[in-house]
């Protein structure tokens, strides 16, 4: 070995010794092996632990055969398995600290030896919220540079909550059977209680949030304990209308918050694929939501999981949520709408797999295919014409003997060669992974027939979320949407935009309305029309 290399190794050793000198207590480590099984990994594990033992006398190694009763007592079944400090923690390593994984081993010693999770304040606050046990598995490999970060996140969670959280770090090369069982063919992957909670490395806040919610979180929104918040604008609803309004209002100089009772992104979060948002030929609904939320967070405070239950207009207006009070100069209602469902077997199962509520959105996917359009009003007829225009073979199914749609629209159906099956209803939707047929009932004869189709579109109405508007005594249109004039409702300081305001129910129209409403609000705050 050359002198320069020897000096470098010595320098690294000294650095490690210095780091490990911070360990305050003994760390018992048990190594379980079974001769003839994964011998290379067993030897690497042994050598790895011995290496660290040379650097600190705090590491106490005990070796066991997998057949030893201690393995049974601890529930260890794989060779090699390293168990860290079993009296205080439930941390196992199925494999050996080789390659990139050596960093994880060092961190494990540091966290356990100092009994400190080392979590930042926000991540620690999320971890604190977890009240039920979590059995975490992190799949790693020696050649994966991203794995140490994710394994370290999990280690920090265990050290922060040793009574509730257990951890298995699983090397996929030493344990291909487990990798197959969990389909963990890319690393790192993290599971909690056998639910996939993260693919790839995350920040520690996002890991803790994913562990808390038991699903992968991609945007972290810090929480606040404030009981009262004073602001210029409260936006109710974190869908595209609310998020766009937030960006425009904040950029105009208004102090703005967005309150969302459920999933950020509103209906977009439920949309598998969006193909008509300008600039993005195809984008997953969840991805589009992440992009919008990340952008909005640059400007506004978002309060997720916060339902508005009451609004008392005044100067200031009081907005009461399930968690706190907001005092504000103005309120924008972007509470959205939801499609009415038919409620027949197969409808939910095939939603996004042939069942659609939006011809504008999904129509192009059915070009040269056969679909049903359920409904008989203006929407059903307009959407059927839209589908026909896109090259879709469409038949309208209506339960009455005549359409509710306006005559000039209905007349266009025969002109465009669209068949109508009057007095029929869909009884069920069937298929094999995707829609293949619908069962129809003739409401006059009572007979049922099967019809082969690739899709079933529904246009049986919307349910706008007007509960708060009702409490405020706001007027609704005949279709049930909130009446407005340039986004102003009849109550000064209360505005409305997006699907709940009626019109075309699309992401672009919602974002357009949200931004326009924000500009109106800005103008009114500068120059209140009701005071002139
Ligand atoms: C399955 C599906 C597929 C679609 N596909 C497309 C598509 O491909 N392209 C397209 O352009 N459009 C599509 N749309 C329509 C589009 O998603 C909507 O038009 C758009 O999301 C409307 O935005 P919004 O902000 O007005 O309302 P929403 O997206 O409905 O958001 C309203 C939000 O307000 C929240 N909220 C309601 N009440 C309260 C309260 N009291 N307190 C706090 N929060 C509250 C709700 O939880 C919700 O998150 C689709 C819709 C669905 C359902």
Image (cartoon, rainbow, N blue to C red):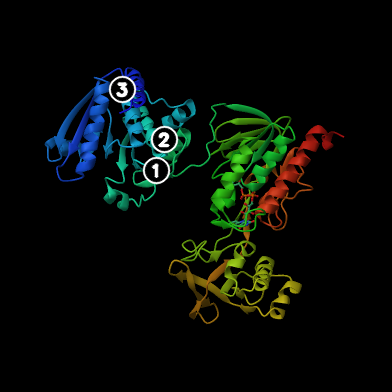
The residue positioned 25% from the left and 27% from the top of the image is: 51
Q: Nearer the viewer, residue 115 or 110?
A: 110
Can you say whether 323 is above or below 410 in the image? Answer: above
- Distance between mark 2 and mark 1 Cα atoms: 9 Å
The residue positioned 77% from the left and 44% from the top of the image is: 488
Q: Nearer the viewer, residue 352 or 3?
A: 3
Q: Secondary structure at mark 3?
A: helix
Residue 274 location (% of width, % of height): 59, 56
Which quadrant holds the C terminus?
top right
Which quadrant holds the N terminus?
top left
Can you say whether 397 is above or below 334 in the image? Answer: below
- Distance between mark 3 and mark 2 Cα atoms: 19 Å
* Label 1: few (<14), some (14–19) or many (≥20) C-alpha neighbours in 10 Å: many
Residue 288 location (% of width, % of height): 59, 49
User: Which residue position is annotated with label 2?
Assistant: 149
Classify residue 224 as left or right of residue 158: right
Q: Earlier in the sequence, mark 3 or mark 2?
A: 3
Q: Earlier in the sequence, mark 1 or mark 3?
A: 3
Q: Secondary structure at mark 2?
A: helix
User: Which residue position is annotated with label 1?
Assistant: 188
- Tell me if label 2 and label 1 are in contact, CB under 8 Å: yes
Which corner quadrant of the image does residue 325 belong to? Answer: top right
Classify residue 511 as left or right of residue 270: right
User: Which residue position is annotated with label 3?
Assistant: 113
- Distance between mark 1 and mark 3 Cα atoms: 25 Å
Residue 244 location (% of width, % of height): 67, 44
* Label 3: few (<14), some (14–19) or many (≥20) C-alpha neighbours in 10 Å: many
Mark whose residue sits in front, 3 or 2: 2
The residue positioned 44% from the left and 43% from the top of the image is: 200
* Farthest residue, direction left: 68
């Amino acid at each position: 070995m050359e002198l320069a290399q020897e000096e470098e190794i010595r320098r690294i050793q000294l650095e490690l010794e210095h780091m490990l000198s911070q360990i305050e207590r003994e760390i018992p480590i048990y190594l379980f092996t079974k001769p003839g099984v994964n011998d290379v990994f067993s030897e690497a594990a042994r050598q790895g632990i011995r290496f660290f033992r040379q650097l600190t006398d705090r590491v106490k190694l005990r070796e066991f055969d997998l057949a030893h009763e201690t393995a049974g007592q601890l529930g260890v079944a794989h060779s090699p398995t390293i168990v860290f400090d079993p009296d205080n923690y439930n941390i196992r390593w199925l494999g050996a600290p080789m390659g990139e994984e050596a960093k994880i081993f060092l961190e494990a010693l540091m966290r356990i030896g100092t009994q400190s999770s080392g979590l930042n304040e926000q991540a620690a606050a999320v971890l604190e919220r977890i009240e039920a046990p979590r059995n975490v598995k992190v799949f790693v490999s020696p050649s994966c540079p991203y794995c140490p970060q994710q394994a370290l996140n999990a280690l920090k969670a265990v050290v922060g909550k040793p009574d509730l959280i257990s951890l298995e770090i699983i090397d996929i090369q030493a344990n291909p059977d487990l990798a197959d069982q969990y389909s963990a063919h890319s690393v790192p992957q993290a599971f909690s209680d056998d639910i996939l909670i993260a693919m790839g490395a995350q920040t520690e806040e996002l890991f803790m949030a994913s562990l808390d919610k038991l699903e992968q979180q991609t945007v972290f929104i810090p929480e606040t304990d404030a009981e009262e918040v004073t602001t210029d604008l409260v936006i109710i609803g974190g869908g595209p209308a609310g998020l766009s309004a937030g960006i425009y209002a904040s950029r105009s100089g208004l102090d703005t918050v967005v309150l969302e009772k459920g999933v950020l992104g509103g209906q977009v979060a439920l949309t598998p694929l969006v193909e008509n948002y300008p600039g993005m030929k195809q984008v997953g609904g969840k991805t589009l939501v992440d992009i919008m939320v990340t952008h909005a967070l640059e400007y506004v405070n978002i309060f997720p999981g916060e339902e508005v239950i009451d609004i008392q207009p005044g100067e200031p207006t009081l907005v009461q949520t399930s968690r706190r009070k907001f005092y504000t100069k103005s309120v924008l209602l972007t509470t959205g709408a939801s499609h009415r469902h038919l409620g027949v077997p197969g409808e939910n199962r095939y939603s996004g797999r042939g069942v659609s509520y939006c011809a504008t959105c999904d129509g192009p996917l059915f070009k040269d295919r056969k679909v049903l359009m359920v409904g008989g009003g203006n929407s059903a007829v307009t959407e059927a014409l839209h589908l026909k225009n896109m090259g879709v073979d469409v038949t309208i199914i209506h339960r009455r003997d005549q359409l509710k749609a306006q005559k000039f629209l209905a007349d266009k159906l025969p002109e465009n060669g669209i068949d109508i099956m009057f007095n029929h209803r869909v009884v069920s939707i069937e298929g094999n992974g995707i829609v293949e047929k619908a069962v129809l009932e003739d409401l006059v004869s009572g007979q049922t027939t099967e019809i082969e189709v690739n899709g079933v579109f529904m246009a049986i109405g919307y349910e706008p979320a007007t509960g708060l508007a009702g409490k405020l005594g706001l007027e609704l249109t005949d279709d049930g949407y909130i009446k407005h004039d340039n986004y102003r409702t009849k109550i000064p300081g209360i505005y409305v935009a997006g699907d709940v305001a009626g019109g075309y129910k699309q992401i672009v129209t919602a974002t357009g309305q949200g931004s326009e409403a924000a500009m109106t609000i800005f103008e009114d705050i500068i120059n209140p029309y009701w005071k002139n």
